[in-house]
Image (tube, grey):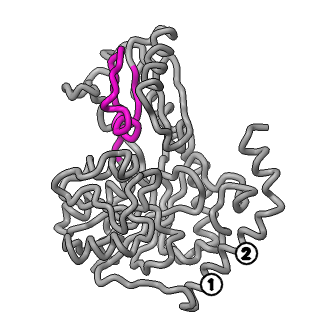
């Protein structure tokens, strides 16, 4: 039994209490006892029912880029988990230039801001403040709430809940007895589902789970999204790698919620992966940890390192004794998802 299973077993007696608290909280918003704010522009929430990674960041990035390409002016609003910036609204980027560091913004908002050109990214613990700033000061005409399903204080026009095709709903128990943030019945609040991280070895399980969702919530559309390899880029800013064998024997590492998925992506890319190491999500790196990674990689016989774009934003300034590469991924939606979003907005 692993550490998580032990903790969930200990916490199981408290799950009904936590479930009741979350259900009561949602009910208080529904009855307008707790304030809900309505913005003058459409709001799209990308969230999940489970703790841990479900692919929200790639979905947010792809959605924001797609809306921008359609002529909209989207802004991404995040809580800024792990970031040190503590103002009511913290401007990671206005869409023109980066204004905060990864340490200030949080690794995921910074990665989104760095990847998207022309899209404001703003953080704030009370998200109505960055939302209003995006609309009033930056003239955003669509708000995308990153990890917004439980943030009921802001009304949304489109509420999408993601499920990772590898982890699905975990043990289907509510925290602290499992990975669910709320009971399953809370999914009645959302408008649509999306299965992310679908690959060949999890497709059958994902389709079976999707069938269960459709049976229980027949009025809600369900979409699929694939993570595909975009490119392998050297950290020094050189040309992207066309032939994966050119980087030699490599040592992979990451600090994301679903490290197995990244490991599988490295292996699928054809890279000669001789060792893989994962850290807890949102790990804060330092020069010492970078030195240790380089030392361990060299001792294992590797002559390079490979990591995620999310990890790279936190380690780009550190010195390294081995070449570092970044495996960049891109998300591909069902064509019907884009049609659904545009139709709902109109």
Residue 27, label in figure? 1
Quarter of the image for the C terminus: give it: bottom left
Does 311 appear in magenta?
Answer: yes
- Residue 337 in which image quadrant: bottom left
Measure how far apart labels 1 and 2 are at the Cα level: 10 Å
Q: Earlier in the sequence, mark 1 or mark 2?
A: 2
**Residue 161 picture location, percent across and down:** 50, 65
Crowding around mark 2 (Cα neighbors within 10 Å: few <14, some 14 to 19, many 20+) is few
Magenta extent? 305-330
Does 177 appear in magenta?
Answer: no
Which residue lies under the disc numbered 2? 20
**Residue 5 picture location, percent across and down:** 76, 45
Residue 316, label in figure? none
Q: Is residue 280 above or below residue 340?
A: above
249 lies left or right of 10: left
169 lies left or right of 8: left
Q: Is residue 321 above or below residue 46?
A: above
Q: Is residue 57 above or below residue 144?
A: above
Quarter of the image for the N terminus: give it: top right
296, 214: nearer the viewer: 296
**Residue 211 picture location, percent across and down:** 60, 62
Q: Please give the name of the residue rendered at 73% of the width and 75% of the height, measured from the top-left corner.
A: 20
219, 124: nearer the viewer: 124
**Residue 298 picture location, percent across and down:** 45, 10
């Amino acid at each position: 039994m692993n550490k998580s299973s032990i903790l969930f077993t200990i916490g199981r007696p408290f799950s009904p209490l936590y479930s009741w608290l979350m259900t009561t909280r949602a009910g208080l918003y529904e009855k307008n006892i707790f304030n809900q704010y309505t913005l003058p522009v459409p709001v799209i929430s990308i969230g999940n029912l489970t703790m841990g990674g479900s692919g929200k960041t790639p979905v947010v990035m792809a959605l924001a880029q797609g809306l921008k390409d359609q002529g909209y002016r989207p802004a991404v609003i995040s809580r800024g988990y792990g970031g040190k910036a503590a103002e009511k609204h913290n401007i990671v980027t206005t869409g023109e230039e980066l204004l905060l560091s990864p340490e200030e913004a949080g690794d995921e908002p910074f990665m989104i801001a760095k990847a998207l050109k022309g899209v404001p990214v703003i953080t704030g613990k009370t998200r109505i403040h960055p939302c209003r700033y995006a609309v009033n000061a930056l003239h955003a005409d669509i708000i995308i709430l990153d990890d917004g399903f439980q943030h009921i204080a802001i009304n949304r026009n489109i509420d999408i809940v993601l499920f990772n095709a590898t982890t699905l709903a975990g043990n289907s128990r509510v925290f602290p007895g499992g990975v669910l943030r709320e009971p399953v019945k809370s999914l009645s609040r959302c408008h649509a589902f999306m299965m992310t991280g679908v690959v060949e070895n999890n497709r059958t399980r994902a389709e079976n789970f999707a069938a269960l969702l459709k049976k229980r919530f027949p009025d809600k559309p369900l979409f699929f999204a694939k993570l595909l390899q975009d490119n392998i880029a050297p950290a020094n800013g050189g040309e992207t790698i066309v032939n994966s064998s050119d980087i030699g024997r490599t040592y992979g590492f990451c600090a994301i919620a679903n490290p197995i998925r990244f490991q599988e992506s490295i292996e699928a890319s054809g890279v000669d992966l001789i060792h893989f190491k994962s850290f807890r999500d949102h790990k804060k790196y330092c020069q010492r940890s970078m030195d240790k990674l380089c030392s361990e990689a060299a001792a294992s016989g590797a002559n390079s390192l490979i990591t995620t774009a999310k990890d790279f934003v936190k380690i780009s300034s550190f010195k390294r004794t081995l070449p570092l590469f970044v495996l960049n991924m891109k998300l591909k939606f069902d064509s019907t998802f884009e049609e659904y979003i545009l139709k709902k907005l109109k």
